[in-house]
Amino acid sequence: MDEQNPVVEDFGRQDESDLSIGEPKDAAAGITGVRVAMQRSLSHMGPKRTAQTLLKLNQADGFDCMSCAWPDPDPENRHTAEFCENGAKAVAEEATKARATPAFFADHSIAELDAHDELWLGQQGRITHPMVKRPGASHYEPIDWDDAFAMIGDQLRSLDSPDEAIFYTSGRASNEAAFTYQTFIRAFGTNNLPDCSNMCHESTSVALAESIGIGKGSVSLRDMYDADLIIIAGQNPGTNHPRMLSALETAKRRGATIIDVNPLREAGLVNFRNPQKPRGVIGGGTDLTDLHLPVRINGDLALFQAIGSLLVEWDAIDHAFVTEHTNGFEAWAEHVSAVDWSVVEHATGLERELIVRAAELIRDSSATIWCWAMGITQHRNGVATIKEIANLALVRGDIGKRGAGLCPVRGHSNVQGDRTMGIWERSPDWFLDNMEREFGFEVPREHGLDTVDSIRAMRDGKASFFMGLGGNFLHAAPDTSVTADAMRRTAMTVQISTKLNRSHLVTGETALILPTLGRTEKDRQASGEQFISVEDSMSAVHASRGPLEPASTHLRSEVAIVTGIAEATLQGRHGIDWAGMREDYDRIREHISRVVPGCEDYTAKVDRPGGFVLPHPPRDSRTFTTDSGKAEIAVSPLEVIEVPEGHLLLQSLRSHDQFNTTIYGLSDRYRGIEDGRRVVMVHRRDIKRLGLRPDQIVDLVGYWPDDDVERIAPRFRVVDYDTPLGTAAAYYPETNPLVPLDSTAEHSNTPTSKAVIVRLVPSDAVPDTAEGADGSQDRTGSDDSHKAHPEPSQLS
Ligand SMILES: Nc1nc2c(c(=O)[nH]1)N[C@H]1C(S)=C(S)[C@@H](COP(=O)(O)OP(=O)(O)OC[C@H]3O[C@@H](n4cnc5c(=O)[nH]c(N)nc54)[C@H](O)[C@@H]3O)O[C@H]1N2
Ligand SMILES: Nc1nc2c(c(=O)[nH]1)N[C@H]1C(S)=C(S)[C@@H](COP(=O)(O)OP(=O)(O)OC[C@H]3O[C@@H](n4cnc5c(=O)[nH]c(N)nc54)[C@H](O)[C@@H]3O)O[C@H]1N2
Ligand code: SF4
Ligand SMILES: [Mo]
């Protein structure tokens, strides 16, 4: 590509000048975590609501934490404070006393709101009324629920094909809401059900389904306590799954060893100060990681293949398991044995001795748990890397064994449940057959669009309607300016939300905001107070009941909103009793009982303390429901991303003070970054090599020669940080403008949010030329070093 059009993205950009940078920490939680949790809770909710919510959080008779999907201990082993700092922040964010009322929307035009950053948008509080932006209007105005439903129904019925509509889901929706939503969407006639999982653990679902026959993890919390070795790859639990640290502490005290594979040394994995234990409050806490492998970004496939080669060389293989339960061992053993160590060292940035040490720990372990998250999934080779992890677990016989197994740690609190309930653009035929039998309508069979393909369809004018059951599609999706243009091309966008976010401001011609109840709130319907149910990362399903009065009397539950839209759209077609489901969620659960295997007698099972665990054939009986009936040990070619001279490989990650696109505050305490988010973390030697200096303000300029735009995220402060040479880190969603829409994982189509090639251009060197009407700056001639560099190479 010779000429690229610069596209600068800076929705509600914060000023980078207030930032303060200190030393990264080497311990997580402790008293500071408790203090921050209490301060945030009290300032957002006041003392009464703080007590009402936090004492019910993650209790058997209370509500499920809406933040991450980490499981709860058995009911008899729960503390009175069974939550973490970030769980408390999530509750405070939802149960805040602040309100975004119709008066607020009358005072602020959409353009004015769009000039604010995400933190400010969230601080405006809970949306109290359904709101509409009519074509050409500058403001949102209130609308009656029935009128809103009628507008949506009219729009959907006016489409030439149901496939012109996109129905997104974010992983906070309950099982009842998700099941009802997918029933409506399929009854309407499409499988266009993209979800946040497409950007998250999709690589896991694809890889594990092919390897072991089911796309879910195979361990329980009990296994964590019994493990001999726990490997944590590409995950930052101290921030994103904080109570996992308690489980790791227990495992550690029972003798487990922990290996951490991460380019960064994340504080939570170094030392944990458990605020519920004296040693965490006044002692030195518990050291967690025994061996840290500071792998270069995207080096994991090479690392795990190298470990595989050593296990083969040492014959540290569970041959009985391999023979009885797997296919493909010989070909795999031959492939990994031929691994080229110079390539491994180049790809991983790790010395051979360190890899040998890790392999020895695996060889000597009697039961190993393999955990991973976004550092593994959001890569071009994410599916291959996860299959390689599964290969190692299989050759070691680590599946269906106490204290061992595969442990993908899910993100959103109910993202796994939503999939179980049929939120999937490619639901398998047996699920669709069950739906057809249950409801009697002809279920569409053609696969629908995932997140990336939905953006393409809206961009290309093939889809003109978007609905989001939760989430913030605009800022969660890659390639922000492409996604923004795609959304703006639609006729109607509908967001079922609790709080204001960017997706309410970058909209279709008509836009609706439908405000909904959250997990903290009581849900009253015609038959009385309802409960909902959720599934955690370890397939445990249980009930959740909110303790608070709703934020506004005008709010409706997700189920009430979805069934209202279904009635207005389908107008009696298919004869489904939407009102019955809304009035009594037991009716939804009866449908679930008959459609979802393992959910028979769902209402009773889900409502007993602690709920129940869904079946998982490999975990339960070493049964593998693949086509061959055996687990597949896969061979993956090793590809290494070559970064052109003068560039860095950038990962986008979460700070300690956000939940995805919701920014709670500006304190990334463990990394020592305070009062701002526009930072790019780079190794001191790279800073020097690139002719930059710490604290300098730079623009991040993407390298993606395949299309004719140059992506620019302006004004980030360079922070000297211990990340492997040649790599960099910056926060999501500020970096989403840099992730090309077409840069996705093979087989899962997940955006490669953890590997974007960028160069750092001093902002002051950039001529501050006139901004174009679209907010883009003309940067032609500033630096064309992105040209003429080699393509990523295929090395074997
Ligand atoms: N408080 C809070 N909790 C959350 C969330 C939140 O935003 N805030 N989000 C929720 C969601 S939806 C999700 S999916 C999870 C996300 O949980 P994580 O996956 O822990 O989230 P990230 O911040 O994306 O961190 C990824 C980690 O991978 C590392 N990494 C990056 N690239 C590589 C690589 O190439 N190899 C290896 N081995 N490591 C790499 C990073 O250094 C970082 O430590 O958390 C959930 N929980
Ligand atoms: N660059 C980059 N991009 C990424 C990632 C990354 O690591 N890097 N991570 C990806 C991942 S793992 C994920 S999961 C996605 C997340 O993508 P999403 O799930 O789309 O985003 P969230 O920020 O979790 O959604 C927040 C919004 O949900 C709404 N909400 C909150 N609670 C409720 C509720 O109870 N009901 C309803 N209906 N709405 C509610 C609020 O209005 C809030 O603004 O982002 C992805 N994008
Ligand atoms: S670990 Fe996750 S689910 Fe548990 S309290 Fe913390 S944020 Fe909530
Ligand atoms: Mo996620």
Image (tube, rainbow, N blue to C red):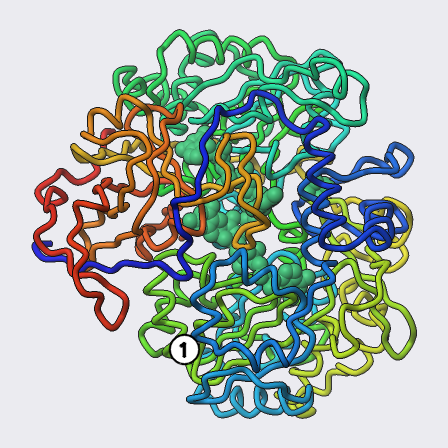
Measured as percent of width and height from the top left, residue 251 is found at 72, 19
Q: In the rendered structure, which amino acid carries the disc numbered 1?
A: Ala
From the viewer's perspective, tell me whether residue 409 is left or right of residue 653.
right
Q: Decide if residue 727 is in sight here.
A: yes
Measured as percent of width and height from the top left, residue 166 is found at 49, 73
Q: Which one is in front, 787 or 324?
A: 787
**In the image, residue 255 above or below residue 73:** above
**In the image, residue 499 above or below residue 243:** below
From the viewer's perspective, tell me whether residue 561 is left or right of residue 116.
right
Report ligand 3 position as a quadrant: top right
From the viewer's perspective, tell me whether residue 394 is left or right of residue 776.
right
Measured as percent of width and height from the top left, residue 756 is found at 31, 43
**In the image, residue 492 above or below residue 410:** below
Residue reaching furthest front?
Answer: 18
| Count of numbered tags | 1
Query: Disc 1 marks which residue?
Result: 463
